[in-house]
Amino acid sequence: MTSFLPRRPRLRPRWRKRLAPLLTTPLMPLAVVIFGGASGYRLTEGWDWGDCFWQVAITLTTVGYGDQAITSPAGRWVTVLMLLGGIVVVQQTLQWLLSLQETGYFQRRRRWQRMQELQRMRNHVIVCGYGRIGREIAAQLSAEGIAVLVIETDPGRITAARNRHLEVLNGDATLDETLQEAGIKQCRSLVAALPNNAANLYVVLSARGLCSSCRLIARADSGEAERKLRQAGADSVVSPYIAGGRIMAATALRPLALNFLDLLAGSNCEVEEFQLVNNPNLAHEVIGRSLIDLDLGRRSGGALVLAIHGVEGLVANPSGHTTLAPGQRLVVMGSPKQLEALEGLLGAALESSSAVQG
């Protein structure tokens, strides 16, 4: 009985697709010679498979240890045929391996493996540029135990970063492809520390277009560059010259207050930011309640809310009547145990947390 139903297309197994490229290389003829010779010795001499493959190896390599004697005429014919075929196949295999080296196959393979390793990174910080500022940023982050990925094109700086055991991506940070390889969608933040304002602007534009939730910090050398970087999507813009001048002036006037975070270093205190969710329905037990009502300090064992940043700006030393609102960022000081307890108290209201100083 003839069926009029259309036939389902036969799908090729995955292993066939993976082995298909090997069929066009000399490796397949080489495998035929090896297994054919071993099978010939197995049939003519009656050796076990280990001795058969050993005889094939010493025959193709022309070593000829002579520890096994071929007694039958058929076995000698196997040797002759294997030598004739092996000379051609081995030569073709060597030429093929040399061609791979010349075409850069192994370099491309290593680069592909490197890209796979980088794409597995999570919650890391991308530092674009490893100059004097980028080097200091990477050092501070590494000291805090935060994974750092450096994007650089200068060979000397790449070597310097790798000598400090940092992950390095050799590429142009202004290109979308480079930022995607660096894991822009999986990182916690990106720092544009290139020496050129225009380059940092391109980095911010590309990064913001690829990931709207990524925190972007950029370097600027002027007030105009700072304004444009903020318009492009930078969350924070830092001018090394302006910041350096302010720090030096403040050091002369208020050294103790300025070095407050430095005094925390080496102690058991840390300052951490807690980002609240934007949806109040996800955390009705926290959102809309005051600090005195939540009693976070006592319940966490002593964590202190230093400031709250929200729509109305920064509120330093908030009172107990301050009400938590969606999207606010809490700056809290405490020991690691206290901060961990506070994170548990915030629960579903917490979107993310990041250390300011350890």
Image (cartoon, grey):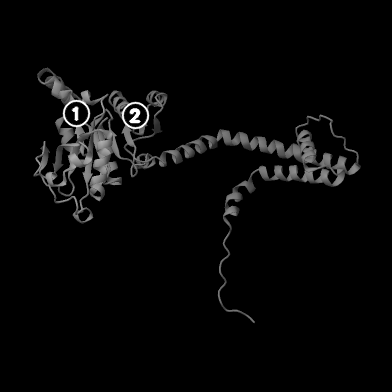
Visible in this render: residue 204?
Answer: no
Q: Which mark is first along the chain, 2 or 1?
A: 2
- Residue at image position (28%, 30%) is 194
Taking the view exactly as shown, the residue that stands out farthest to the bottom is 1
Circle 1 sits on which residue?
239
- Residue at image position (22%, 43%) is 275
Q: Identify which amino acid the numbered label 1 is placed on.
A: Ser
- Please state, as top left, top right, bottom left or bottom right, where the N terminus lies in the image: bottom right
Which label was assigned to residue 142?
A: 2
Q: Tell me if 238 is positioned left or right of 23 in this view.
A: left
Q: Identify which amino acid the numbered label 2 is placed on.
A: Ser
Q: Where is residue 310 drawn, in percent x and y? A: 14, 44
Q: Tell me if 205 is positioned left or right of 113 in this view.
A: left
Q: Where is residue 154 drawn, in percent x and y? A: 37, 26
Q: Where is residue 60 drawn, in percent x and y? A: 76, 35
Q: Image quadrant of residue 40? A: top right
